[in-house]
Image (cartoon, rainbow, N blue to C red):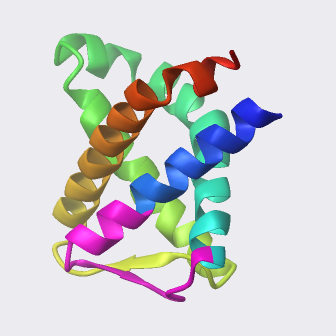
């Protein structure tokens, strides 16, 4: 259970960093509770939709030597924002929405990577 909470907090911090850094991403509610709920939605999207999307786009991923994964992550980031708006905890992407989602997904990936390195013992459950 501690491992789940650690990953949830890492996702929440990474999403908050993306929203704070990029002016093209606007939160609906600017409180930590909505970020926590958005991180839960983000985790569910990554757990349920990402494997299906990667399986369906496997030929494109192989053809582009893995670069299509960045496009898939962008679409998953945008889907997270849209699903969050359905529950009034999401974010909106300003035009051009694709590039804002792309940069947002990159920021989330980098911040998550760094926090996972720092908290590697907690994430592994040791």
Q: Which segment did they paint magenta?
A: 16-32
Residue, x 28% and y 21% (percent of image)? 60
37 sits to left or right of 85: right
Along the viewing direction, whichever of 126 and 95 lies nearer the viewer: 126
16 sits to left or right of 95: right
Q: Establish if 107 lies above or below 4.
A: below
* Quadrant that contains the N terminus: top right
Quarter residue 24 falls in? bottom left
21 sits to left or right of 44: left
Along the viewing direction, whichever of 44 and 107 lies nearer the viewer: 107
58 sits to left or right of 33: left
Q: Establish if 30 lies above or below 99.
A: below
x and y percentages locating residue 50 in the rendered image: 53, 34
x and y percentages locating residue 119 in the rendered image: 49, 30
Residue, x 57% and y 19% (percent of image)? 121
Residue, x 39% and y 17% (percent of image)? 58
Q: Establish if 112 lies above or below 26.
A: above
x and y percentages locating residue 33 in the rendered image: 66, 76
x and y percentages locating residue 52 in the rendered image: 58, 29
Along the viewing direction, whichever of 125 and 85 lies nearer the viewer: 125
Quarter residue 5 falls in? top right
Quarter residue 6 falls in? top right
> Does 74 lie within the magenta span?
no
Task: Farthest residue to the right: give it.
Answer: 1
* Quadrant that contains the C terminus: top right
């Amino acid at each position: 259970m501690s491992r789940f909470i650690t990953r949830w907090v890492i996702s929440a911090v990474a999403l908050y960093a993306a929203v704070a850094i990029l002016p093209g991403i606007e939160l609906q509610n600017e409180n930590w509770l909505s970020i926590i709920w958005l991180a839960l939605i983000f985790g569910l999207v990554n757990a349920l939709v990402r494997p299906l999307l990667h399986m369906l786009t496997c030929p494109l991923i192989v053809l582009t030597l893995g670069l299509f994964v960045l496009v898939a992550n962008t679409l998953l980031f945008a889907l997270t924002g849209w699903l969050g708006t359905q529950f009034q905890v999401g974010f909106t992407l300003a035009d051009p929405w694709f590039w804002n989602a792309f940069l947002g997904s990159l920021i989330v990936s980098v911040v998550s990577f760094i926090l996972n390195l720092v908290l590697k013992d907690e994430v592994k459950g040791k």
